[in-house]
Image (cartoon, helix red, strand yellow):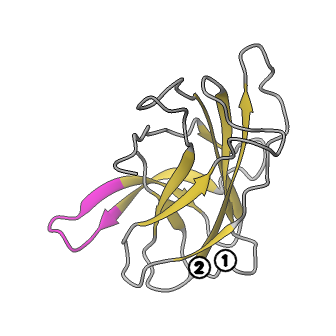
């Protein structure tokens, strides 16, 4: 398919009205470079559920086609073993429709084996529906999106917080 067009999205906010503090922006340090190399990332607290929320407008046309939309998470951790569990819930809204609606939770939860080297990125892709399921993604929609770290899920075995690299 060639190189897809990527739009880098910045989450609007971590969840505050529920599960506050379980996902937050943090500065982390890589200690091998001298002096330390500091970098920012969204951090999901281990063993609890954490959420990031954002919304954005989908483009009308990309490369003369309607969007084949995907949410791509770039995860990493200061660990060499473990699984981190994530899912994405979305809901497209057309102009004039309320944003205060239930999100679509039909995308599968992904249990992500983390790389065997600390701080190696792992890309995880969630493909958004473009037909069916009563909530297909359409061009020019505003897309509500919630990223959830399922830290209380039994398959989530990572012993440290999981990081999500920003765009």
At x 43%, y 55%, the residue is 165
Q: Residue at x 68, y 73 (%)?
A: 47
Residue 99 horizontal side relative to residue 83, left or right: right
Residue 21 magenta-highlighted: no
Name above or below for residue 63 compared with residue 47.
above
Which residue carries the number 2 mark? 83
Q: Answer few, some or many: residues within 10 Å of disc 1's Cα (few below 14, many 20 plus, some between 14 and 19).
A: many
Look at the numbered discs 2 and 1 and tell me whether their residues touch, using CB distance below 8 Å. yes
Relative image position of residue 9 (x, y in whole percent): 49, 38
State the image coordinates of residue 118 (x, y, percent, origin top left).
Answer: 38, 78
Observer-nearest of 128 and 159: 128
In the rendered image, the residue lying farthest to the top is 96
The residue segment tinted magenta is 29-39
Point out residue 32 in the picture as x, y percentages from the top left corner. Answer: 21, 74
In the displayed structure, 40 sits above or below 64; it is: below
Q: What element carries label 1?
A: loop
* Percent of width and height locating residue 141: 65, 26
């Amino acid at each position: 398919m060639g190189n897809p067009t990527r739009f880098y999205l910045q989450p609007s906010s971590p969840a505050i009205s529920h599960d506050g503090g379980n996902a937050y922006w943090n500065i982390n340090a890589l200690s091998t470079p001298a002096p330390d190399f500091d970098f920012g990332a969204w951090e999901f607290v281990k063993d609890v559920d954490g959420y990031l929320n954002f919304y954005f407008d989908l483009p009308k046309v990309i490369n003369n086609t309607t969007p084949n939309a995907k949410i791509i998470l770039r995860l990493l951790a200061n660990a060499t073993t473990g699984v981190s569990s994530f899912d994405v819930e979305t809901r497209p809204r057309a102009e004039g429709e309320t944003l205060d609606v239930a999100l679509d939770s039909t995308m599968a939860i992904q249990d992500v084996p983390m790389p065997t080297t600390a701080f190696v990125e792992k890309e995880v892709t969630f493909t958004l529906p473009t037909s069916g399921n009563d909530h297909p993604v359409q061009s020019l929609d505003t897309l509500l999106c919630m990223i959830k770290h399922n830290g209380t899920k039994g398959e989530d075995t990572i012993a440290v917080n999981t990081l999500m690299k920003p765009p």
